[in-house]
Image: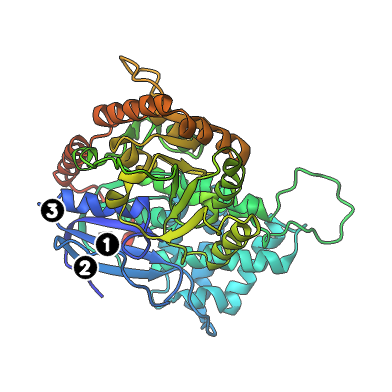
Amino acid sequence: MTLPKADICLILEGTYPYVAGGVSVWVHDLIKAQSNLTFSIVALLPDRAERARKFDVPSNVVGIQEIYLQEKSRRGRGGRRFTRMVERMEPPLSRLLQQGSLDDLAQVIEALKTDPETARTDLLNAEDSWKMIVGMYERGLPGTSFLDYFWSWRSLAGGLFATLLAELPPARVYHAVSTGYAGVLLARAALETGRPALLTEHGIYTNERRVEIAMADWLTTRATASLDIDKSRRDLRDFWIDAFVGYSRACYEACAEIVTLYGGNQELQKRDGAPPDRLRIIPNGIDYAGYATIVRSTEARRPTVVLIGRVVPIKDVKTFIRAIGALREAVPDLQAEIWGPDDEDAVYAEECRTMAAHLGLLEGTLKFMGKVNIREQLGRVDVIALTSISEAQPLVILEAGAAGVPSVATDVGSCREIIYGRPDEEPWLGKGGEITPLSNPMATARALAELLLDPRQRAAAAASMKARVEKSYNKREIDRVYADLYAKHLAAPDAKPSTKQAAA
């Protein structure tokens, strides 16, 4: 499917328009705000399962292309041309998967053109590919289980090949909202078209993958029988992390500008190879005027605390549930709610419900509300809680703040500077809530109790949050900044394409 040429091609991994959440809302609002431009969307998805759109896509989106990172396998073909292609591809692919570079990615792309009929399943299943996998294992991770390495390689390389073999939509500017596989496709677009590549990272992809890999029960590090006592040897977790670092590094090197939401993220980007002279900060913005007009409920009601977010592990909903269990001791008439879909990780969502039931919270204290119209409901909320183990700049804190609702949040992303203010805030506007350590339900419960039981402290925090959001996070100004960013790169001349296919 060839999409019409768009002004901007947005490259999105596992998000808009099929997944709800802060990043998806940001993408949706970005497209609507730049209504004078046309957009195409490349949605990178795990598989071909049917998915309902969670958003009504704006009319200036001219098409959506889906790329599936994992496909059912079939027997791969071979032949002399395919053999030559694998021989050319193996060295740069090995380097790319070990924190490689844009040049390594470019060489992999060039090698793929040796045999234009190659399909993703060929690269995973042909005999020459098997020999390549064995060779890479023996050189890179000989002390680990080959079976574990084999399936890890197929997952990492399978997603890579899916992005490199898919049709590339025509556009004047390419813009990804993460690194990872989306970043690989962005780098490929820059190499093959010579058009500018822009990146906006909300959370740092490699950091989020590091957290997931550290928590992954399915990813073992068991070694084969060996007398080697060298603990510096790489293991499978290193293999996964190094591959994602390589993908990110290639993306960073290909970008004309690399945007993130706050200064702390830039240190992580530079660690993974982002050129410092291309880094830029543009914070999230929200519709301050719309949220600031939400009327606070004056009716008699129970003290109400809400977690707004998807019921998934990275939001650490279990810490929130444990905190509510402890908070109920100090605030017996507590009303706690979770606003967010629970269909993304059904197993985790069921574990959360089981935990809540075990603590006796489902008998009048805690409700799983599903997706909620936030603007309609914020007026009856006293405090929101955020217990995530990884965030960038959560929109829910900004939205609640504009509506005069303070927050208790974990010390992740830019939560500290949103709630306490940036070091250069002048004048200082005061604390808009409290920051707590990660995975600490007792600290969360204590902070929530202070705000719920002290109306004066809660009112002061609410006023601070409202003033800070108006001053620093107003979407009207952020929309103008992105309009200028797009205008600058839409007007840029074509760079010389860096692949033979593009030059041909």
Residue type marked 3: Leu
Q: Earlier in the sequence, mark 1 or mark 2?
A: 1
Q: Is residue 349 visible?
A: yes
Question: What distance separates the C-alpha of mark 1 from that of mark 2?
Answer: 6 Å
Q: Earlier in the sequence, mark 3 or mark 2?
A: 3
The residue beneath circle 3 is 37
The residue beneath circle 1 is 41
Q: What residue is at 86 percent from the left and 61 percent from the top?
A: 225
Residue 63 numbered mark, or none? 2
Question: Which one is nearer the viewer's eye here, 218 or 237?
Answer: 218
Q: Residue 393, relative to residue 121: is it above or below?
A: above
Give the image's coloring scheme. Answer: rainbow
Local packing at callout 2 (Cα closer than 10 Å; few below 14, some 14-19, many 20+) is many
Query: Does 441 sit left or right of 340 as displayed?
Result: right
The quadrant the C terminus occupies is: bottom left
Question: Which one is nearer the viewer's eye here, 51 or 171?
Answer: 51
Residue 449 x %, y %: 53, 34
Question: Which one is nearer the viewer's eye here, 278 or 59?
Answer: 59
- Asked if marks 1 and 2 touch (Cβ < 8 Å), the reply is yes
Q: Residue 451, relative to residue 376: is it above or below?
A: above
Numbered disc 1: secondary structure: strand
Local packing at callout 1 (Cα closer than 10 Å; few below 14, some 14-19, many 20+) is many
Q: What residue is at 27 percent from the left and 63 percent from the top?
A: 55
Question: Which one is nearer the viewer's eye here, 158 or 29?
Answer: 29
